[in-house]
Amino acid sequence: MSDDFCEDIWLALIRWYRLNGRDLPWRHTNDPYAILVSEIMLQQTQVERAIIKYQEFLETFPTLQSLAAAAPADVIRAWATLGYNSRAIRLQTIAKIILTQYNGVFPSEPEQLLLLPGIGAYTAGAVACFAFKKSAAAVDTNIRRTLWRIFKGEVFKPANTPKEEYAFAQSVVPPNGDDAYLWNQALMDLGSSVCLPAAPKCDICPLINNCRAAVIARRHSLFPEDASVAPILRAAIAEESEKYIVGSQKRPQKPFRQSSRFFRGRIIHALREQPGAILLTELGPMIKQDWEEHNLSWLEDLVSGLVRDKLAIWADDLHMAATLDGASTDLLLD
């Protein structure tokens, strides 16, 4: 990859971002704690939903110290409506570790951040880059797709290991920390608004003259050189997508209302509504309309998962009851 090719892309995309970047609250701070909160929230939550909870959460727990000292039930209450409550518990665990093992000094390098529970390669890169202006790659779904189209000309799911993906993404990050910050933010916005999965808006893309996927699409089409490349790419994406789905022989996904996540949420809701402990034989009919006694082991497994995630505890013994937040009866979990 030539330096000139990379530099042309950096300049074009950063220029576009300065004019078109989203105004998001976590882009107005370099506080690593606040940025970590935003990144944990955004792991499995849409941006629009995260914005409101991000501001509320930081008003309730403005510092690592305040989060670490809080009761778990209060932390999960502040997380309400975001789902995946285990993220809130992991966030509090991280706060405690930074205070006790790092003397309150936030790790700044991706390798250090990866040692914290619940932080993967993307989050480590994002915090290092956005909080500390490190020249670090942050590869989420949008960035991966956009990078592979721009630099490699691949239009659908790249067949690379995560390690290879990060190595490549790191190789094209600007070396200057300020530019790396703008680059990663710009890639996210381009991927979420222009370089879309199935219907890219190539006509408004700032990299249309640099993107190798666009060049390849034109080269293998009968379209005139000045025609829109978007329909060509969309056709290629559809073709590659079909090959991938057929080749992978993916199993159909369960409907959400039959998923473990759905029933975990119903268990937490039931525990919130019932002070104290609940017998599993009473809990079952509360969460499953067609409950039968042979479902008891299935329910035990679900509750055990919540216990492992520190969202519940067993009361008395394994077969009798479950409750939340230690011995407390303050069960306000969503």
Image (cartoon, helix red, strand yellow):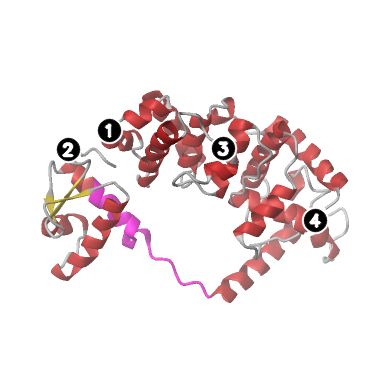
Q: Is mark 1 on a helix, strand or loop?
A: loop
- Tag 3: residue type? Val
Residue occupying the point 29% across, 47% down? 310
> What x and y, as percent, mark residue 215?
83, 57
Q: Mark 2 points at which residue?
A: 328
Residue 119, percent from left and from top: 49, 46
The tag earlier along the polypeptide, 3 or 4, is 3
**Image depth: mark 4 or mark 1 in front:** 1
Is 127 on the left or on the right of 326, as rendered?
Answer: right
x then y, percent, for residue 254: 39, 65
Q: Name the residue under label 1.
A: 71
Dot 4: element: helix
Which of these two is toward me, 155 or 275?
275
- Measure the alpha-carbon separation of dots 3 and 4: 29 Å
Q: Which of marks 4 and 1 is nearer the N terminus?
A: 1
Lower sequence index among marks 2 and 1:
1
Check disc 2 and give the amino acid type: Ser
Q: Residue 90 carries which label?
A: none
